[in-house]
Image (tube, rainbow, N blue to C red):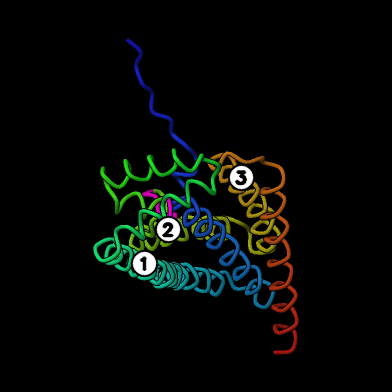
Amino acid sequence: MRTLHRETHLIERIGWLRAAVLGANDGLISTASLIVGVAAASPSRNEVLVAGTAGLVGGAMSMAAGEYVSVSSQADTEAADLRRERRELAEQPEAELAELTKIYIDRGVEPDLARNVAQQMTAKDAFAAHARDELGLAPHVIARPVQAALTSAVTFAVGATFPLLIALVSPTRGLTWAVAIACLIGLAALGAVGARAGGSGILRPTFRVTFWGAVAMAATSAIGAIVGHEV
């Protein structure tokens, strides 16, 4: 007797993976940029640590709120479409069956077979069939606001903690360079881990996140130096 195996597809990770990668990268880049900018303006370690800590807390809360609001809007839209689909199935079952049949025909199924498949899918679970094949709402792509918010907040805080620790142990004179170099290495590692978890190539995502991290830190450092000099 043949045993069935369950395939685990990478697309199933997309919900939490997107929020995790975004949160960690944002936490590291924004906090490191803030620390580098303040350090360029003022040599005081206390000011740098206060600014970095404030950036960590504020950024984590902002990420959580932003993700929750954004993904909740997506969830509301999905729920509205599903309610409409359920109503149409109750009021116009034949029209919905014809619509499902056309979907399968458009995908390359012969008309008679498509009609037969649509009838069987409708008999088993019409609502699930239309949600999946008409609306494209499979379980792994359904919006989950709380999951996205918590994942973003936690990963932001983890990413932001790294430059804070580097600033805490680095000598004051070389703090800016220590934070910048360590965080570029951290960003490269995050890019590689995110790419690996998502099943894509490592080189391009790693270069992309490292490049933009370097740009962000260079910009805040230049602004901090200008403002610090003027003040």
Residue 54 vs 117, above or below: the answer is below
Whole-angstrom CA distance, mark 1 to mark 2, is: 8 Å
Estimate how packed mark 1 is, as few (under 14), some (14 to 19) or many (20 or more) residues with alpha carbons within 10 Å: some
To which residue does mark 1 refer?
81
Which residue corresponds to the image point at 50% horizontal and 59% vertical from the top-left?
A: 23
To which residue does mark 3 refer?
189
Sequence-first tag of 1 and 3: 1
Q: Amino acid at mark 3?
A: Ala
Describe the element under mark 3 as helix, strand or loop.
Answer: helix
Q: Is residue 137 magenta?
A: yes
Q: Are marks 2 and 3 in contact (CB under 8 Å)?
A: no
Give the image location of residue 119, x and y in percent: 33, 44
Sequence-first tag of 2 and 3: 2
Indicate which label's residue lies in the foreground, 2 or 3. 2
Residue 213 vs 190, above or below: the answer is below
Q: Which residues are magenta?
A: 133-139
Estimate how packed mark 2 is, as few (under 14), some (14 to 19) or many (20 or more) residues with alpha carbons within 10 Å: some
Out of 17 and 141, give the one closest to the viewer.
141
Q: Amino acid at mark 1?
A: Asp
Describe the element under mark 1 as helix, strand or loop.
Answer: helix
Which residue corresponds to the image point at 51% horizontal and 46% vertical from the top-left?
A: 105
The quadrant the C terminus occupies is: bottom right
Whole-angstrom CA distance, mark 2 to mark 3, is: 37 Å
To which residue does mark 2 refer?
135
Describe the element under mark 2 as helix, strand or loop.
Answer: loop
Please state if 124 lies on the left or on the right of 76 as rendered: left
Point out which mark residue 93 bears: none
